[in-house]
Image: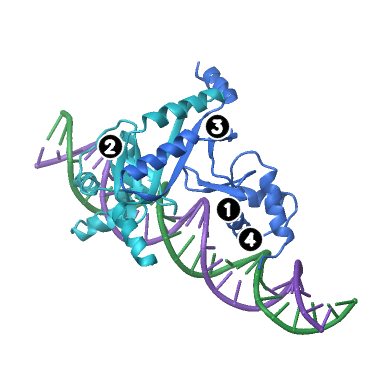
Chain colours: A blue, B cyan, C purple, D green
Amino acid sequence: MKRNTWQREAVRGALDANDGFVSAQALHSALHATGSPIGLATVYRALADLATKGDADSLQSPEGESLYRACSTSKHHHHLICRNCGLTIEIEPHAVEQWANDVAAANGFTQAEHVVDVFGLCAACSALAAASAS
Amino acid sequence: MKRNTWQREAVRGALDANDGFVSAQALHSALHATGSPIGLATVYRALADLATKGDADSLQSPEGESLYRACSTSKHHHHLICRNCGLTIEIEPHAVEQWANDVAAANGFTQAEHVVDVFGLCAACSALAAASAS
DNA sequence: CCGTGATCGAGAACACTTCTCAAGTACCAT
DNA sequence: ATGGTACTTGAGAAGTGTTCTCGATCACGG
């Protein structure tokens, strides 16, 4: 039995308000900044729940943090993430899905899951990088 | 200036002796098991160095550990990893490389890097899972 | 063989996440 | 509306993995 608490709503709201991936800690800070006395443990729980229900994506940042993002669809999909500004674009990798399954099957693997995320610099950040590099 | 110490050799050796990805902690334990009094900090340092020089791959396990693997080639490639036994197969994702670049370019991204790893159950572990599930 | 300074190692320090448990409270039935 | 129940919360402790500190050590060049 799941209850509807304002804390859960707050977490979901904070996640929705954010375009890119955010860490649990950042989300907690953000919520506190708005005056919510929500606890860190609760944020983690809420995020875990959202991720489980498919309402949020989670991935590991290279630094080892767990990052979360509101997910408009619970369908399987992947991301194109700007390394600099965090801008995230959802992508639909039909080809990759197929490929991953093929590769897995060819090697006798079952229950294949794949981690496919593309990191790069978005157009804006690319321009900035080029400018500062010159 | 880099020195050649037996500790570094030991770490590299232990990594080579292993087929799949291993955690830094596991590597440290393995080394201790062989009698090396090597320190955990040193293992981390050596692994970080190897990864930096391109002699080792590193990736984050879903649990957040850093996993390392000796890398025969410093060429870009990906992995098919058994979730159960750790068996790792290197795969050559021509199609995916192309796709990743296309997607990145289509969205104005530059310097695209991608994380493409497929997790699953290898043939042997699949059989085991099926047997225990029934 | 010596001196220098990079490296080692044990443990402390850190960051992130999960767990504990008493107190609070949303929900259902009445 | 009221009461009971048990899920949820929150503060801090605990746990885990990684990095840092710093004196001691040891590889390497001379």
> Looking at the rendered structure, which numbered label has been put on residue A84?
3
Q: In the displayed structure, does residue B88 sit left or right of residue D16? A: left
Q: Check residue A51 in the rendering and tell me which mark sits there, or answer none.
A: 1
Q: Are marks 2 and 1 in contact (CB under 8 Å)?
A: no
Cα–Cα gap, marks 1 and 3: 24 Å
How far separated are the C-alphas under marks 3 and 2?
27 Å
Using the image, name the chain to which the residue with label 4 belongs.
A
Query: Which percent across, then down, holds residue A63?
Result: 47, 44
Mark before the other along the chain sequence, 4 or 1: 4
**Disc 3 to disc 4, how far (Cα)?**
29 Å
Mark 2 highlights which residue? B55
Residue tagged 4: A42
* Residue B46 visible, this angle: no
Quarter of the figure with the N terminus of chain B = top left
**Mark positioned earlier in the residue sequence (3 or 4):** 4
Q: Secondary structure at mark 2?
A: loop
Q: Observer-nearest residue: B98 or D25? A: B98
Label 4: few (<14), some (14–19) or many (≥20) C-alpha neighbours in 10 Å: some
The Cα atoms of the two marked residues, 2 and 1, are separated by 35 Å
